[in-house]
Amino acid sequence: MQEIAKGYRPMDMNDKWVAFMENDRLFLHRSWTGHGIYEVRFAAKGYSWTNETGFMPTSARVETDPRRYNPDEFDPFRERDFLRDLIVHVSGEPMPISLPIVGSYGPSIEAVLGDITTEEVDAIVNPANTRLSYGGGVSGAIHKAAGPELLAHCKTLGGCPVGRAKVTPGYWLDAHWVIHTVTPQWRGGTQGEPVLLESCYRESLARADEVEAQSIAFPALATGAHGYPIKQAARIAVEMARSTPTDLQLIRFVCFDNRTLRVFRSALGQDS
């Protein structure tokens, strides 16, 4: 496990994998494309007869989007065996492991027309400002619907940088949690806006996992007063929803008008 935690990068062109760990999760990405293909979660396991602690995989998932990973014939058992071989390769030592879960298809992703403040999901995402103070637009509507307790809680969090996210209870909302993320101002796309917007989605999904949410609703982040072009923002939103490892079962994009809905459904490949 110590070797795995150090990370792994290919030594030559024939080695197609990059491996790295974040907390208890191992991620295996294709070195040529950067696409994440496997994610494995480990847990410490004590062995009473030796008084030692080892690490055991508790779950695994594999990318099944054919645009990112397209085996000739998808077979969960073959994927399990191949992933076991990859972990052995990365660790540099034999490890007869068992993987109980392989082939998770990830969360359902959808776009709907509606009002995010009325969504009956575990968490909704608030496009906040860096002070996490009462704002206008979607953020103002969320604060109004959640009640004054939300703002009072936000004042205790010390603000939030652009691209990051923090979580609070939902208070008067139907949603149990509000995830506050600060989106970038559009400046032509040359000031790191795409990277920051991607980070907003990844951070929001990470906060949702931390509170064990099963469903989350996003507005069209950064497309209002911050001026992010809607088609580019929708593409990033969908890519992050599809590629970010998460335990969520549902990711919903709540669009405030029909034009936004059409763009998001197009990004999802659901053109009607």
Image: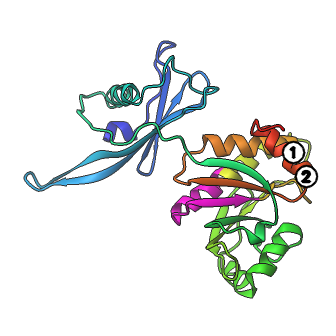
In the image, farthest residue toward the front: 272
The amino acid type, in three-letter code, at marker 1 is: Arg
Q: Residue 247's spot in the image, x, y percent?
A: 51, 53
The circle drawn on residue 140 is: none
Q: Disc 2 vs disc 1: Cβ atoms closer than 8 Å?
A: yes
User: 203 left or right of 145?
Assistant: left
Is 214 a magenta residue? Answer: yes
Q: Looking at the picture, does residue 162 appear above or below residue 74?
A: below
Q: Residue furthest top?
A: 14
- Provide the secondary structure element on which disc 1 rests: helix
Q: Where is the C terminus found, in terms of image quarters?
A: top right
Residue at the image position 41 percent from the left and 50 percent from the top: 24
In the image: residue 60, left or right of residue 192: left
Looking at the picture, how far across and down is residue 220, in whole percent? 81, 54
Q: Which residue is mark 1?
A: 262
The answer to which of 113 and 202 lies nearer the viewer is: 113
Q: Is residue 246 visible?
A: yes
Identify residue type, mark 2: Asn
Q: 110 or 204: which is nearer to us?
A: 110
Instruction: Kindly identify which residue carries mark 2.
Output: 258
Name the residue rendered at 33%, 36% in the picture: 3
Q: Which residues are magenta?
A: 202-218
Determine if residue 130 is in view.
no
- Residue 59: image x %, image y %? 38, 45
